[in-house]
Each structure stands twice: as structure tokens, then as C-alpha cells.
Image (spheres, coloured by chain):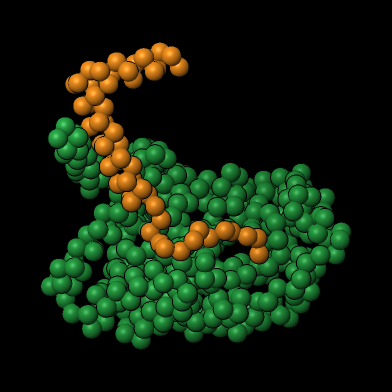
Chain colours: A orange, B green
Amino acid sequence: MNRFMTFIKNMRQNEKASFMGTVVFFYLIFLALWLYFLLSKDSAAPAFIYEQF
Amino acid sequence: MKNIKAFVLAFALFLLTAGGIHALSKNGLPEYHIRYGTWMEEAKYASVNGLKKLLDAGQTLPIFGSSELRHGQNSAYQGNHIFEGADMKPVFIGQAGYQSLTHAITMGALGESLAGRKAVLIISPQWFKEGGVKQDAFLSAFSEDVFIEFLENQAISKETKQYVVNRVNALAAGNEEMGVRIERDVKWYGEGAGNPAQNIFAQGHRLLIKERTDMGLFLKSSLCGMRKKEKQGNEKAIDFTKLYQDAEEEGVQIASHNEYGMFDRVYERDYQKQIESGQGKKPRYTIESEEYEDIRCFLEICGANQVEPLVVMLPFNGYWYDYLKLTEEERQAIYDKAEALVKEFGAAYADLSGNEYEPYYFEDNSHPALKGLVDLNEQIYDFYKEYETK
């Protein structure tokens, strides 16, 4: 945990790394939204819960 | 300022990624292999391009059904195993909750690509509830891509389209978002909508829906390993007599210690307590079910698109429905009405209803297993071979 915190701290202090971190952050958000749009069901209906006859 | 730069750069990278995947998926929808053909996945049924590509492979036969397509896939008696390497390639369309109306719309969407070919519709007698398909089941299976293609099929009569639109509207009642979508689709792509190509919104919407369904299929099939090309022969002879023997032998081992014709473990897990405590009420299956009109609609669409259908009627598990006091006469009336309807269209009909008490025929109270699956697949294969020799 300590190592991770040190890594984050170092990254924040490094201008280039901080910039790249922000880019990756936004990129992942776009990607997640896009994947959600593509993979969510093509229906506004609630999921059908199958029950035995 | 730095954050804005990062935002723009991230967006550009994202556009590159999305564009790259789009280009890949454009020609990357999976090709036929038995595992993909019999894959039970909504993304497969929702994409018209995906289904057309699947059915374009030679020797394919679309098989429309519901949960019985999934049951038994781990056994040697379901189509995914029986037809592996054989000269017929099954394409399963449907899963639990899919009934005639959904299949009619899909048949309409596939339209011309199936002209002059055969298709199979497997009917479960449990579909014949008063109102037919359940609202949540139908809406859950609804694909806008399929619905739009159905609406644009010029071979289907105005009356049949209106019937489907009325049924869809009735089933979507109470779901505001679905209602809006359906109304918009009918307005943009239905009868009297004019040329959708002249409506920029209709065109844009169509592109968006296609992108979503095709990309969804591409991603899901990739994640599930369905895009791997699998070599398969097409020469394997299917020995149904041996399959019946194997099924019977297996049945003795796993389905001979209960009086309800089910697998013993399924009986013990799901039914024994219920039966011992006298629970269970008579189901309301009826010859007044709207399902009959939905089947009529399916058959009309087959006719309009020159598709030759085989309708297979699965049996009730006689022991179980005797217990629930759905009488033999009531069950027979349901079978008879379906048969009369199918005969009215001159379509092929495989009646499995005489197997209600056949040993080793069911997995549970409704789904065929062992000899039931062998029987079902033999009927389908015989129908396919007739087609080949014509």
C-alpha cells in the first residue's frame, strides 16, 4: 500500500506522468461509456426472469 | 488548460479505438461453426446482419424455439452434438421466453435471405396461455434492429404487419420508453412511411441501431470465443437407432426412480417436496390463447417469403400434467387446434404429442431430454433431408 501511495505521489509531482494519467483516466471513461452503450440490452424492458412452467 | 488538452487527446484516442473496432467488426461477424450456430445468446438473435451471415453458410437450417434448445446441450442428444460434423448445420434462434410472435418478427426480418429454403418452429404446449407470450418475456427478447428490418420487408402484407404492430403495442403498454421506440419505428419504417432514405433522422437512427447490434455481437462473440474458426467435416452419418439405444440405457440409470418421467436428480431437487405436500395448481393453458394467432402470423410470413416451415409440437409431460389435473382431453384440444392451424397452411407438422408417457423422454415437467431430444432432432433431420432431395 505504501509503495502504491509513493508511486501516486511521484506521479503527481511529475508533470508528464500526471498529464498521461489524466489522459488515461478520460480514455477509460469514454471506453466504459461506449462499451455500456454497445453491450447493454437492446430493449428498455426489464430482464426476463425465466421461471419453470 | 492541461485538463482540456488531456480530454481532447483521450477523446481522439477513443475515436481511434472505436473506429478500429468498427472496421474490424464490419467484416468480423462470426462465421458458421456448430458451437456458434447453437450458441444461446441474445446478441446473436438481435443482429440481422449476424443472423444473415450465419445462415449464408451452406447446409444451414434455422430452428426457432425456446428453452428446449438449451436443455441437454451438455448431453449427446441435443442438436449441438448430434449434428457436429454432419451434413446439416442447425442455427438455433430463441431461448427461454421466445415464442411465435418474436419468431414471426425475426422470420420477417430475415425475409428474402430465406426465400426458397426451409425453417423449423418448435412449439411448446406451455406457450398456450390465455394472452400468449408474457409481456416481460416478449419485451426482453425485442430487438429494434430485427423489428425495423421486419417493417421494411415489402413481401409481407399490410394486414400481417398491422397485426404484429398491434400485438407489439399491446405488449409494450405500460412501458413508456418501448412505446415511444415502437411508435417511432412504425412511423419511420412502417407502411406509408415513405422512403426512409429520404429521412435523415431515420437513416441516422438505423445506422446507430445497426452499429450497436453488430458491434455488440462482435464483442460478445469475441469474448465468448465464438469467432475462432473451427474445422468441421460434413460427412458424419447420424445413427439415430444407436442414439435411441444410448438414450434408453442412460435413462435407466438417471431417470427410472420417480413416477413422473423426469431425471431423478431434477425430481428430487425441484418436484418431490411439491408433490409430497400436494402443492401445485392447474395451469391455465387454453385453446383461446392468443398464441394461435401468433403462430398463424408466423406461417403467413413464411408463406409471403417463400419459406417452407416444419412445425414441431412438443408433448406435455403426461404424468406431471395429470398431477396438476390438466386433463388428457384439455391437452389434446390444445394439440388439435395447433395441428389444424398448421394444416390450414399446408405446412409440415411433426406431432410429438403422442409421447406424453414415453419413458426417458423428459428432463423435467416439460423439456425433452434423452429419447425426447433424439426424436426431436430426427424429425428435424428428416425434414432437412427431404429438402435436399427435392
Q: Position of residue B276 (x, y in %)?
A: 87, 59
Give the residue drawn at x 73%, y 50%.
Answer: B266
Depth check: give the residue in front, B202 or B90: B202
Image quadrant holding the C terminus of chain B, namely bottom left
Specify whether residue A43 is in view. yes
Which residue: 27% across, 42% down?
A30
Of A44 and B367, nearer the camera is A44
Q: Is residue B57 above or below residue B99?
A: above
Q: Quadrant of the N terminus of chain B?
A: top left
Relative to residue B125, is residue B75 depicted above or below?
A: above
Please give left or right for residue B241 compared with residue B158 in the image. Answer: right
Closer to us: B283 or B34: B283
Q: Quadrant of residue A14?
A: top left
Q: Is residue B16 found left or right of B361 in the rendered image?
A: left
Percent position (x, y) of residue B226?
A: 39, 42
> Residue visible at 50% across and 58% down?
A47
Q: x%, y% of residue B256?
A: 80, 50
Q: Judge whether residue B87 can be spotted in this image.
A: no
Q: Quadrant of residue B278?
A: bottom right
Count the numbered circles shown: 0
Q: Residue at image x 36%, y 14%?
A: A6
